[in-house]
Image (tube, rainbow, N blue to C red):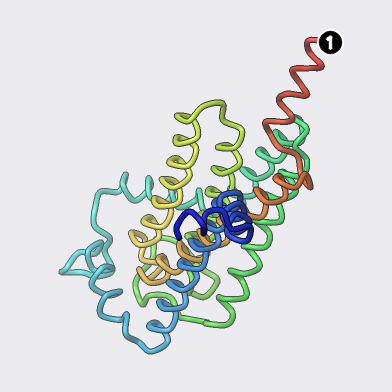
Amino acid sequence: MFHRLLANEHYRRIQSFVSGEIWLLASIAAASGLILAFLSIADEVLEGETEAFDNSILMLFRDPNNVDQVIGPAWAHEMVRDITALGSFSLLGLAVFGVCAYLVMVRLKSAALLLIVSVIGGTLLSTFLKMGYNRPRPDLTAMSEQFTASFPSGHAMLSAVTFLTIGAVLARLAPNKGLKIFSIAGAVFLTLIVGFSRLYMGVHYPSDILAGWCLGAAWAVLCSAIAFKLQSIGAVEDPEDEDERTASRTVA
């Protein structure tokens, strides 16, 4: 019976599709899980169920005798401001510009376009969600001036979108497994420290950060999955094919 199933034409077609699209299916599953996590956090925020959790975490970074005083020496405060700037729109924009310029120079123009679309799309999504939820900022003396709503964290979300997308692009260009892992790990690390810096500064609730990470990672995964699918059907350049063409021209 089992051998008959394996020999069945319909079964072989399904097996071929699943094995050929395993990364795409895994990406969709991961993105779906992250989106569900975001919606769950958003639902609890609207119902006020995260208040105790949010306040308890925020107080870890405050002097218990004076909640307006952030713990740590002055140099640590300055260092955190520098780290949080990594998630600002201006610095992320410069990073995207630099990576896109590199991709264009190595003749991966479609990859550069996909990166731009990913980041701009994530920025618009973050802006609309902030306007929709319109959650007030924590009622604390912050280390910097803020001009937008609190939920979800724009810094957490946009750093996840930008760094994870760039990490995925660099991983595709990396010549070996070690560099691929380094690219992804570096992107995750930068995303995490930007989010933690927002907590330290008292400008976001922990639930804002978690929601931003979830949605930003989901968006980056979806964009990377789309890029992978387009490469598989030849709609955009494949880095490996471009390397082979470059090598052929060099030899010629």
Which of the 4 quarters of the picture holds residue 14? bottom right
Residue at left 38%, top 55%? 197
Image quadrant holding the N terminus, namely: bottom left
SS for dot 1: loop
- Horizontal relation, residue 165 to residue 64: left or right: right
Image quadrant holding the C terminus, namely: top right
Q: Position of residue 164 (x, y in %)?
A: 53, 49
Does 8 sit above or below residue 248?
below
Q: Is residue 168 visible?
A: yes
Residue at left 40%, top 76%? 41
- Horizontal relation, residue 187 to residue 123: left or right: left
Q: Position of residue 19 (x, y in %)?
A: 56, 50
Q: Position of residue 106 (x, y in %)?
A: 74, 29
Residue at left 40%, top 68%? 204
Residue at left 72%, top 44%? 112
Does 88 sit above or below residue 34?
above
Does 98 sit above or below residue 248?
below
Residue located farthest toward the bottom when viewing the structure as drawn: 47
| Residue type at numbered disc 1 | Ala
Name the residue nearer the viewer: 174 or 94.
174
Name the residue nearer the viewer: 64 or 39.
39
Name the residue nearer the viewer: 120 or 8.
8
Local crowd size for mark 1, using a 10 Å CA cut-off: few (<14), some (14–19), many (≥20)? few
Q: Disc 1 designates what residue?
A: 252
Name the residue nearer the viewer: 153 or 211.
211
Q: Position of residue 133 (x, y in %)?
A: 52, 82
Which of the 4 quarters of the picture holds residue 40? bottom left
